[in-house]
Image (cartoon, rainbow, N blue to C red):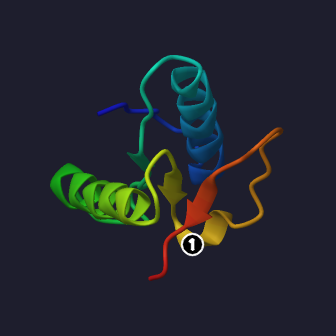
């Protein structure tokens, strides 16, 4: 779990995508689910649960991806971005 206090979801998704790209340069890959407080839940447990659901969406979509909130669909990442948005 990575926490980014007072960080808008679009920046958290960008950070997650940069992490995914860095890890991809090694012999492993990473799938990441991003959630935002209070948009995705009123307490930490519900936000973690939402991020976990998005993590599995990323894995089910082919792994090695970032899935974030549906309202960050305009996020752009240089290179071969694998950022997706959650279907809510």
Image quarter of residue 52:
bottom left
Taking 43 as reference, is 75 left or right?
Answer: right
Q: Where is the C terminus found, in terms of image quarters? A: bottom left
Residue at image position (52%, 50%) is 66
Image location (x, y in percent) of residue 24 = 55, 27
Q: Is residue 20 left or right of residue 29?
A: right
**Picture quarter with the N terminus:** top left
- Residue for point 30% across, 65% down: 41
Return the x and y of residue 2 as percentages of the image width and height: 36, 31
Q: Which residue is mark 1?
A: 70
Residue farthest left in this picture: 45
Nearer to me, 64 or 35: 64
- Residue placed furthest toward the top: 26
* Residue occupying image coordinates x 81% and y 39%: 79
Asked if 19 appears above or below 86 in the picture, the reply is: above
Q: Quadrant of residue 51?
A: bottom left
Q: Is residue 15 above or below residue 60?
A: above
- Residue visible at 54% across and 33% down? 20
Q: Nearer the viewer, residue 41 or 16?
A: 16
Q: Is residue 81 left or right of residue 65?
A: right
66 over 42 or under it: above or below: above
- The percent coordinates of residue 80 (x first, y second) are 75, 44
Q: Is residue 84 left or right of residue 47?
A: right
């Amino acid at each position: 779990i990575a926490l980014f206090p007072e960080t808008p979801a679009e920046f958290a998704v960008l950070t997650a995508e940069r992490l995914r790209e860095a890890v991809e340069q090694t012999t492993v890959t990473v799938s990441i689910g991003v959630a935002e407080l209070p948009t995705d839940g009123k307490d930490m447990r519900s936000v973690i649960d939402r991020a976990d659901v998005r993590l599995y969406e990323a894995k089910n979509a082919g792994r090695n991806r970032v899935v974030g909130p549906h309202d960050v669909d305009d996020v752009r990442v240089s290179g071969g971005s694998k950022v997706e948005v959650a279907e809510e």
